[in-house]
Image: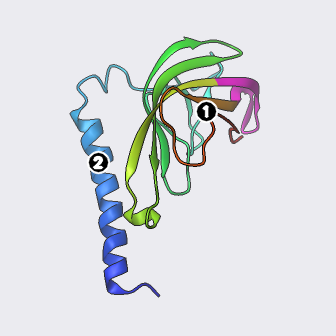
């Protein structure tokens, strides 16, 4: 069982993350004009998020669905096609030092590439990207290689 001080630290960390996310969204005057487009019927290859929502050109994307400790922000898409998509953005990663609730988030510039479209299990008429590659253009999180390629959920 968590001690009161640990519980307080965990709750403060969670509240800080939620406040930061809401403040960032509210402070962005272009958020409404550049909001991700949700695809209701197949019109383009899509990116499926943690909530099984389909998106085209999302500005933000959570990579660590379980805890939110890694996400892409400020994405600007230079290409979005049937077989691949490319963007530049920032990968914001929690260093989890000394533990994740007390960790610090750091931003790392990246080039994002989506590819390997496949039919989506939830709706086989929809093609979705199944692989993401992140290329770090400057510094990167501890333990990461310059290019990280990860499968995307179905």
Q: Residues within 10 Å of mark 2 (few under 14, many from 20)?
A: few
- Labelled disc at residue 20: 2
Q: Which residues are magenta?
A: 114-130
Q: Residue at x 36, y 62 (%)?
A: 14
Look at the picture and state if 11 lies above or below 135.
below
Q: Give the mark nearest the N terminus, 1 or 2.
A: 2
**129 is within the stretch colored magenta:** yes
- Which of label 1 and label 2 is nearer to you? 1
Task: Residue 82 in the image: state x and y as whole percent.
Answer: 69, 13
Look at the picture and state if 86 lies above or below 142.
above
Question: To which quarter of the image does residue 135 belong?
Answer: top right
Q: Quadrant of the C terminus?
A: top right
Question: To which quarter of the image does residue 76 belong?
Answer: top left
Task: Residue 36 in the image: state x and y as whole percent.
Answer: 45, 26
Disc 2 on helix, strand or loop? Answer: helix
Task: Residue 27 in the image: state x and y as whole percent.
Answer: 22, 34
Specify whether 4 is left or right of 78. left
Question: Label 1: which residue?
Answer: 146
């Amino acid at each position: 069982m968590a001690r009161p001080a640990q519980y307080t630290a965990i709750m403060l960390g969670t509240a800080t993350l939620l406040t930061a996310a809401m403040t960032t969204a509210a402070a962005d005057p272009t958020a409404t004009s550049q909001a991700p487009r949700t695809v209701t019927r197949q019109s383009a290859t899509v990116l499926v998020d943690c909530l099984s929502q389909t998106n085209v050109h999302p500005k933000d994307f959570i990579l660590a669905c379980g805890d939110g400790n890694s996400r892409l922000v400020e994405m600007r898409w230079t290409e979005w096609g049937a077989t691949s998509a490319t963007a530049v953005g920032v990968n914001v990663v929690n260093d989890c030092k000394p533990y994740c609730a007390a960790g610090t988030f750091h931003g790392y510039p990246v080039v994002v590439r989506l590819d390997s479209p496949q039919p989506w299990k939830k709706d086989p008429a929809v093609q979705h990207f199944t692989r993401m590659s992140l290329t770090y253009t400057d510094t990167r999180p501890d333990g990461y290689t310059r290019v990280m390629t990860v499968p995307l959920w179905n």
